[in-house]
Amino acid sequence: MATNIVPEKVEIKGEARSHDPEKLAQVTQKIVSTFEDTARILQKGDAFPRVAVTVTHDFPNTDIPENHDVVVLARNAAANLGKTLESKTIGGGADANVLFGKGIAAGVLGTGMTDVHTVNESIALKDMEDTARLVLEILQIHATGDVK
């Protein structure tokens, strides 16, 4: 004979991201209110379920102007290597977001990977070598203090 066992506590973790802070707030509120509304519908008196929600902001948006030293430095390094560096706004989050939230302007250099975060993720050896050369050039320029 099967016995239904209901856990005393269930913890759910989720994530929402957007480059638009207003949209992020709306999506986050929709997620939270869906849990709260569902719990309210299922609740009978003081009985379960109850919902307690904690929202933390782990990935602040990065918004580094094109003329910021970090961008200029990377562009100069690419130019020194005969390359053109293109700035883009992309989705996702990185350690750079956390650093940016603490007042440190840190961009993310794309490395040429394909099928990122899948079982087919790959990168050409030449792209890795080019990225390593770019990082080395950035460090060399930075070490001279000649960021213009």
Image (cartoon, rainbow, N blue to C red):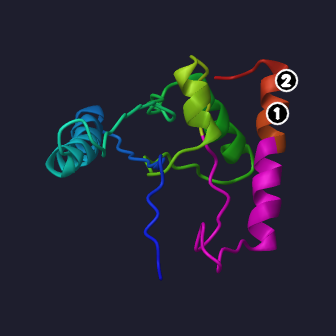
Q: In the drawing, what numbered circle is on residue 139?
A: 1
Residue in the image at 78% along x and 25% along y = 142
The Cα atoms of the two marked residues, 1 and 2, are separated by: 6 Å
Q: Is residue 87 above or below residue 72?
A: below
CB-based contact (under 8 Å), mark 1 and mark 2: yes
Q: Along the horizontal axis of the image, is 23 left or right of 7?
A: left
Q: Secondary structure at mark 2?
A: helix
Q: Which of the image's four quarters has the C terminus?
A: top right
Q: Is residue 97 magenta?
A: no
Residue 4 percent across, percent down from the top left: 43, 69
Q: Quadrant of residue 47?
A: top left
Q: Which quarter of the figure has residue 143?
A: top right
- Number of the label disc, if any, that sits on residue 143: 2
Give left or right: position of 144 versus 27.
Answer: right
Crowd rating for badge 2 (residues with CA inside 10 Å; few <14, some 14–19, many 20+): few
Residue at the limit of the structure toward the front, as seen here: 1
Please name whichever residue, 138 or 24, is drawn nearer the observer in this view of the structure: 24
Residue 98 rendering spot, x and y as whole percentages: 58, 30
Q: Residue visible at 75% across and 50% down? A: 81
Could you tell me which residue is drawn at 69 percent across and 23 percent down?
Answer: 147
Secondary structure beneath label 1: helix
Pick the front one: 43 or 135: 43
Provide the major secondary structure of the magenta segment: loop
The answer to which of 90 and 71 lies nearer the viewer is: 90
Q: Residue at x 65, y 67 (%)?
A: 113
Query: Which dot marks residue 43?
Result: none
Tell me where residue 27 sits by quadrant: top left
Amino acid at circle 2: Ala
The reply to whether the magenta stretch includes residue 126 is yes
Tag 1: amino acid: Leu
Magenta residues (range): 108-135
